[in-house]
Image (cartoon, grey):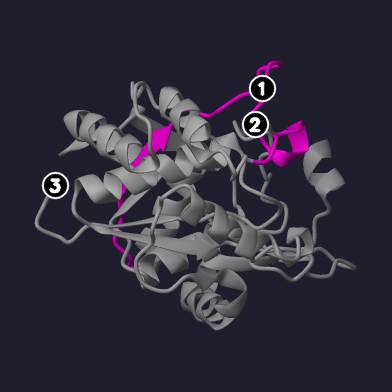
Amino acid sequence: MNNTAYIGRFAPSPTGPLHMGSLVAAMASYLDARTHHGTWLVRIEDIDEGRTVPGADEAILQCLQAFGMRWDGEVVWQSRRKALYEAAFARLGSHAYACGCTRREIADSRIGIASDGAAVYPGTCRGGLAEGKTARAWRLRIADDCRIGFTDRWQGEVSQHLPSEVGDFVLRRADGFWAYQLAVVVDDADQQVTDIVRGADLLDSTPRQIYLQRLLGAPTPRYLHVPVVTNSAGEKLSKQTGALALDVLRPLPELIRAAAYLELDVNGVDTIEQFWQSALHRWQARFRD
């Protein structure tokens, strides 16, 4: 790693309590920040206000503290940073355009399905809205020859041809909320994040974020995407697939389980303090650089 001070972050969405999948992501980002003697920030990603559960943000923060994870600086909430997203959107200028397509129309185009399950946008509104159409969302115009590649510290070499694998993606949604891709890029740049450690379910989003970073003149952080925790059916563990809330009254067994998903052997510890000492030692052996 270069001499730039390490700044990492954990950015949960307050749609419910933390579960094992989110604990694994939090643990990995926390260990990586502490391994590099860096700053570990917490950001509440509540930009999708329609899915936000009242009180979930405070429950998440209390859970992190109960599990021995102490963040640096002040916690920030995306819902309080909308002016930053508006300013970034304005800087994109002609790279952004209005789109009047419905989800059904995009799906019916049968251009293809991205790896995240979304339909690839066919570019219907690139040349302007058709007669009788009104703007529903705003999209980012992707260069026709755009291929984004990067080296992930866990997953290795990653490459994505954005036009064929994703298409022009949404910056502002039809419901008026800013899209995740724009908000996360603006936040990471504003908070000077140097390293992003998160779940591999977001690996597919990274090339889009790198493309946005380049358009906005923002630096590209290093990335490390840890394996996704799945349920017995092989589905990503989430609130939608029945993920159970973490037991904050018995944090040590939960921590040991999470460490196992990260291939960290920390058995034989009796306290939370011992757990973190052991886990940090093992993480350092693999990801010091």
Depth check: 96 or 45 in front?
45
Q: Amino acid at mark 2?
A: Leu
Quadrant of the rendering where the C terminus is positioned:
top left
| Residue 86 falls in image quadrant | bottom right
Q: Of label 1 and label 2, which has the lower sequence position?
A: 1
- Labels 1 and 2 touching (C-beta < 8 A): yes
Per the image, the residue denoted by label 1 is: 231
Residue 273 locus on image (x, y percent) = 33, 43
Please state if 288 lies on the left or on the right of 100 as rendered: left
Residue 201 locus on image (x, y percent) = 54, 35
Q: Secondary structure at mark 3?
A: loop
Depth check: 255 or 5 in front?
255
Per the image, the residue denoted by label 2 is: 237
Q: Which residue occupies 56% across, 36% down?
A: 21
> Which stretch did the figure color magenta?
217-245
Q: Which residue occupies 59% across, 45% down?
A: 248
Q: Of label 3 and label 1, which has the lower sequence position?
A: 3
Per the image, the residue denoted by label 3 is: 1
The correct choice, above or below, for 85 with respect to 117 in the image is: below
Q: Is residue 229 magenta?
A: yes
| Residue 271 falls in image quadrant | top left
Q: Is residue 12 magenta?
A: no
Is residue 200 something that shows in the picture?
no
Distance of label 2 from label 3 (alpha carbons): 32 Å
Please state if 15 lies on the left or on the right of 35 as rendered: right
Main secondary structure of the magenta stretch: loop
Q: Secondary structure at mark 2?
A: loop
- Residue 48, label in figure: none
Q: Which residue occupies 34% across, 66% down?
A: 72
Instruction: Residue lying at the far left in this picture: please name it.
Output: 3
Q: Which residue occupies 59% across, 52% down?
A: 168
